[in-house]
Amino acid sequence: MEAKLVCLFYYLSIALYCYCGNLVNAIELPKYTVIRSESDFEIRFYNESSWMSASVSGTSFEQSTKSGFHRLYQYIHGANLNSTKIAYTAPILTSIPSLSIEESYTIRMYVSSNFEGKLPPQANPELKLQVEKWKTQNIAVRKFSSFAKDDNIKKEIEGLLGSIKKYINGSYEKMLQDKRFYIIIAQYNSSSLNSGRLNEVWINV
C-alpha cells in the first residue's frame, strides 16, 4: 500500500511539474494570421499592436540587443513610475540598420493586450524607452534555430530577401525603396535555452 502511495505521489508530482512548466511557457505574443505559406517562408497579417522600444547606437547586433534588452528587462521588473512588475512577452525584436552602420538599432518588447486602449506604465526617464503604435501590416517571416548572432543573421536575412524576390518579384524593388522598409530579427527564447530555439527574420511587405 505504501509503495502504491509513493508511486501515486511520484506521478502526481511529474504531472504538476509539467503543468506548471506549460504555464511558465504560456507567454503572450502579438496576434497574427498566416496568409501565405511557402517551404522557406510565410507571410503573416499582424493586427495593430504596441511595443516598448529602446534605441541603441552601435555596430554589433548582439551587443546592441543585450544593451536594449537590459533596459526593457529593468522596465518590466519595476523600473517604471508605478513600480509595477509587468508580465514578460515575446518576441524580442531587434531592428537591423539597413542604410549604414551609423544608424541605431531599436530593440522592442511587445506590450501585452492587457493594456489595450490605455498606455502601459511610463518607464523611468533614465531608461529612455518609448511606446510605439504599429498599424496592421503584412510581414514576411523566415524561421531559423540556434542563437541569433552577428555572424549568422546576414545569411538568414539574405535568404528571406531571396524568397521575397522569387515569389513577389513585381514588388521587390519598390519594397526596398520604401521609407517604411525594415528588417527585424525576432527572438523567442531565454538565453539560457541552448537547444530548440526559435528565431525569425521579419521584413514588411
Image: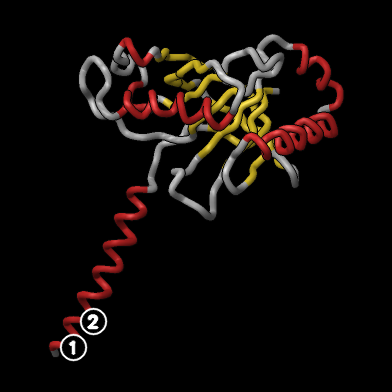
Specify the quadrant that holds the C terminus.
top right
Residue 37: quadrant of the picture = top right
Residue pictured at 14% horizontal, 90% vertical:
1
Asked if residue 35 shows in the view, the reply is no
Residue pictured at 61% horizontal, 48% vertical:
145
Where is residue 170? Give x, y as percent. 86, 22
- Left or right: 196 with respect to 38? left
Q: Secondary structure at mark 1?
A: helix
Residue 150: quadrant of the picture = top right
- How far is the residue under mark 2 from the one under mark 1? 6 Å
- Left or right: 75 with respect to 131? left
- Left or right: 126 with respect to 139? left
The way the protein has been coloured in the rendering is secondary structure
Q: Are marks 2 and 1 in contact (CB under 8 Å)?
A: yes
Where is residue 88? Give x, y as percent. 36, 35
Asked if residue 192 shows in the view, the reply is yes
In the image, 36 versus 133, the foreground residue is 133
Q: Amino acid at mark 1?
A: Ala
Task: Give the residue pinned by disc 1.
Answer: 3
Residue pictured at 30% horizontal, 66% vertical:
15
Q: Secondary structure at mark 2?
A: helix
Total count of labels: 2
Where is residue 6? Give x, y as percent. 18, 81
Examine the rendered structure and indicate whether residue 10 appears above or below residue 87: below
Residue 127: quadrant of the picture = top left
Where is residue 52? Give x, y as percent. 42, 20
Q: Residues within 10 Å of mark 1 (few under 14, many from 20)?
A: few
Q: Residues within 10 Å of mark 2 (few under 14, many from 20)?
A: few
Q: Amino acid at mark 2?
A: Cys
Task: Give the residue pinned by disc 2.
Answer: 7
